[in-house]
Image: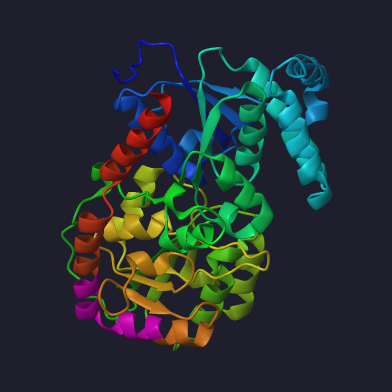
């Protein structure tokens, strides 16, 4: 059967958490790549775009349709959808699935997912025969109910928080019902394989688009001895617990006072004000430039001007953790050496003393020790930066990943 093209009626629906979102630029990249491969789809989001949406490089042609973020915001739309959904052939099965889930999840969000599923199921074009959910938590819950209502199949793309914070029973039942689950890191894939049929789990790294891959000609000469030419540290990370930025502030405070360095941080988030306060208390505030959320082009500019990328990621109290942070791949793709903590999928991209340096998550003293060593050793930084570039160029090709996801979706659509 011929592949779908953009001129055909879509047979695929894609459901995402929010669109576009700066912290999920990889979603926009993947969807644009699928369109470029002739896969047409309707796009649906559980949330409206945030204030940083204008910074996202979004080339997706499909215009997002937004489901009710909260049911009371569009109560009549939800009521009409519920009444219409009850006439769908699979509604009884979806209702039974919800009744089974409800005792195990008493939160209001579970009811919201059912309401959103009714809207999705009744507003999808009749041509849709498969739904692809980005994220295994709330989007996949909505998609699972909606797919049962419509009597069609679905698949999931799983990433980080959705893998580590969703309960086992929830993930296991979604894996059982899904046609396939694409996972972007081995740590997450390993967890999901313990919960469901291993043959359904496909490890497909996000990778780096060719446009971001460039070995920038850099001379690593700064060694922390010249206050007029400080070693520039770059950190691209949302100000949330799992990124370990509290550890970073504590590590900076442990560095000898006579070492010349500066830190440029890119990212927004709920902990930003707290982190700035910690920096003032620790006496390192004058060394840090807080740049806030920035476009991808600005991120690349900061990386190209940097001497060392730092990300002391850890496991948050709710068990959330990174997969393979895209920012690490971006840094390696510009030949910037990386110092990070060994958590989640970080070690898939950073091999200690080979393609970067790794240390124990949450250990500020050890992070400071390695940070001081790298600041003082430009030759080691240059070696690690070049090795990191070779690693990402060889092993993390986004185009190859897009090809694999497109093939999986074509299999289901055909």
Residue 236's place in the image compared with 9, above or below, is below
Q: Position of residue 193 (x, y in %)?
A: 49, 58
Q: Where is residue 405 in the image (x, y as percent from the top left)?
A: 36, 39
Residue 164's place in the image compared with 232, above or below, is above
What is the span of residues highlighted in magenta in the rendered image?
370-384
Nearer to me, 114 or 24 = 114
Overall secondary structure of the magenta stretch? helix
Give the quadrant of residue 138.
Answer: top right
Question: With 356 as the anchor, is 66 left or right in this view?
Answer: right
Q: Residue at x 40, y 21 (%)?
A: 40
Q: Which residue is drawn at 42% across and 87% down?
A: 369
Residue 112's place in the image compared with 121, above or below, is below
Which quadrant is home to the C terminus? Answer: top left
Q: Which residue is drawn at 67% across and 17% down?
A: 122
Question: With 72 as the anchor, is 331 left or right in this view?
Answer: left
Q: How many labels does the image show?
A: 0
- Tell me if residue 139 is in the magenta stretch: no
């Amino acid at each position: 059967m011929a592949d779908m093209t953009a001129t055909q009626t879509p047979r695929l629906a894609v459901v995402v958490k929010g669109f576009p979102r700066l912290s999920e630029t990889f979603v926009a990249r993947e969807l644009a790549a699928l369109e470029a491969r002739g896969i047409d789809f309707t796009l649906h989001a559980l949330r409206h775009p945030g204030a940083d949406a204008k910074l996202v490089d979004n080339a997706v042609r499909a215009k997002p349709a937004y489901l009710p973020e909260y049911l009371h915001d569009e109560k009549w739309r939800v009521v009409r959808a519920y009444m219409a959904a009850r006439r769908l052939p699979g509604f009884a099965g979806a209702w039974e699935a919800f009744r089974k889930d409800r005792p195990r999840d008493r939160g209001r969000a579970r009811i919201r997912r059912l309401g959103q599923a009714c809207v999705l199921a009744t507003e999808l074009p009749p041509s849709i025969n498969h739904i692809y959910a980005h994220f295994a938590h709330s989007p996949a819950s909505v998609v699972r109910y909606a797919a049962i209502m419509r009597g069609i199949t679905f698949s999931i793309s799983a990433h980080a928080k959705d893998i580590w914070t969703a309960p086992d029973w929830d993930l296991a039942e979604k894996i059982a019902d899904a046609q396939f689950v694409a996972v972007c890191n081995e740590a997450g894939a390993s967890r999901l394989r313990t919960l469901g049929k291993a043959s359904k789990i496909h490890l497909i790294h996000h990778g780096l688009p060719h446009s971001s891959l460039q070995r920038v000609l850099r001379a690593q000469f700064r060694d922390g001895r010249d206050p007029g030419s400080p070693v520039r540290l770059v950190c691209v990370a949302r100000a949330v617990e799992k990124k370990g930025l509290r550890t970073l502030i504590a590590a900076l405070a442990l560095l000898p006072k006579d070492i010349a360095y500066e830190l440029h941080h890119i990212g927004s988030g709920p902990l930003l004000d707290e982190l700035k306060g910690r920096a003032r208390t620790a006496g390192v505030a004058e060394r840090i430039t807080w740049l806030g959320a920035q476009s991808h082009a600005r991120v690349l500019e900061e990386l190209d001007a940097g001497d060392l990328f730092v990300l002391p990621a850890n496991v948050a109290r709710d068990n959330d953790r990174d997969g393979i942070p895209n920012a690490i791949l971006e840094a390696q793709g510009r030949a910037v050496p990386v110092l990070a903590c060994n958590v989640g999928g970080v070690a898939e991209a950073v091999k200690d003393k080979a393609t970067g340096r790794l240390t124990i998550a949450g250990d500020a003293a050890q992070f400071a020790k390695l940070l001081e060593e790298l600041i003082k050793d430009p030759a080691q930084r240059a070696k690690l930066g070049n090795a990191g570039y070779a690693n990402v160029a060889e092993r993390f090709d986004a185009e190859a990943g897009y090809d694999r996801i497109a093939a999986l979706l074509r299999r289901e659509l055909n």
